[in-house]
Image (cartoon, rainbow, N blue to C red):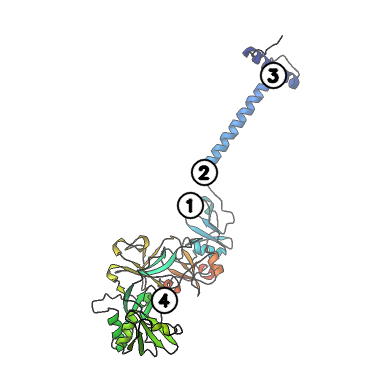
Amino acid sequence: MTHFPLPTTRAQVSGHRFLVRRLEHGLVTGDTRMIHDPLGRRRRGILFGVAGCVLAGLAAGALALFVPEPDPGDAAVVRAESGALYSRIDGRLHPVGNLVSARLIAGSDVEPVNAADSVLAELDRGVPVGIPGAPGAVAGTIPDDLVWSVCRSTVDVTVAFGPPPPPPPADSGVYTRVRGVDHVVTTAGRVALPDPTTRFGRVLRRRLGITADTPVWEPPPELLNAIRELPPYERPPNSGVLLGNGRESWLLRADGILRLSPLQRGILLDLGAAERAVPQDGPAARPDATPEDIRLPATVLDWIDPEQAVICAIGDDGHLGVIGDTASAPGIYAPGAGVALSGDSTATRYAPTVVNGIGVDTGHGYYLIADTGLRHSVGTAGELAVIGAASPARAPWSIIRLLPAGESLNRERALEPRY
């Protein structure tokens, strides 16, 4: 006959618990009568004790979180509750104006350790030190797709660090005049034009469509120097004879022929070259001459009006960038963007997309560009790493030099008392 287990009743469970407690009581006290229950009092005492410890721990954690009094210990750089920075020099805390100065004094790119005012009040403090105007924060990493550029609008010269401005169309150019010398600026670079009173100068201007009504861009000389310079225009030697078949033209050389663009053909004809007519298959009878650089413009240009555009020199190679509508220029290239610069620097505004100090390597020296636009020289790459810019961005000196110069950043200067 099969027997199925019956469910346990509440009375059975209660009785089992009573017998277990009576057995524990007998084993511990030697008395199974259960007249008193000292073990129950002990258990309740333990539970209350644990609960009290937990509550005390929570209270201590709340005090540490909401009313902290951190002790900085022997930290090299300390930050007070007010945000003021202190540098530890020979065991004494000295007020320091910025994080860069504090790191130079410490000799490493340490982060400040927080300290309660009540703790600072008990520590020895000295006179203020540090380099005035040095950055308060430094960008540790710089995105690779950002470039340096300098742009001229109708009112400002802006040094920018961000996405590059767009290039102009390939068939456009900027007619430029600086210190009485005319230049043609294109995507390839800038070329000086001959004196307009010379025959060559007059021919070039007429063929390029330069008239008294052509818009002229007159930037500061320092800005023009940031654009890549190309060799000046010149008439090719031995360019007295051209060959033409009615559709194309070639320059006749001793070892063959060189193809000319229609504009180059017109310039040479205006300079007195003679053109010899040849049949359609005439050029096929002559070899190509040794390639050489014909330093004449190849195409007629569509001149950009500087009153209606922002014109920029971009990057190490100084190529041309143009933002066609000054009123709707994007981001850092918008009118009035960035920080206004005072003093007599060529740049009048500084507009970076990185808001902290930026370490740069120009190939001729190291600099830290503050978020205020000041250019601080730094002696070595090691010192640049100490202040937190271990991976400096590449920057052309022709653009960086347009910013106002600030204090040199070094440990000796940072240790100087401020009074």
**Rounded to the nearest whole Å, what is the CA distance between mark 1 and mark 3?**
57 Å
User: For mark 2, what is the residue?
Assistant: 65
- Separation of residues labelled 2 and 4 (CA atoms): 58 Å
- Of the two numbered discs 4 and 1 on the same chain, state the one appearing first in sequence: 1
Front position among marks 3 and 4: 4
Q: Can residue 294 be seen in this view?
A: no
Residues 222 and 106: in front is 222
Q: How much space separates mark 4 and mark 1, taking CA atoms?
A: 51 Å
Where residue 150 sits in the image (x, y, percent)? 38, 70
Q: How crowded is mark 1: few (under 14 residues within 10 Å), some or many (20 or more)?
A: some
User: Which numbered mark, 2 or 1, is in the foreground of this view?
Assistant: 2
Where is residue 71? Give x, y as percent: 56, 51
Amino acid identity at mark 4: Arg
Return the mark for residue 21.
3
Looking at the rendered structure, the secondary structure element under dot 1 is loop
| Amino acid on which the number 3 mark rests in the picture | Arg
- Residue to which mark 1 is pinned: 81
Cα distance between the residues tagged 2 and 1: 14 Å
Image point (74%, 18%), residue name: 26
Q: In this view, does 74 lie to the left or right of 21?
A: left
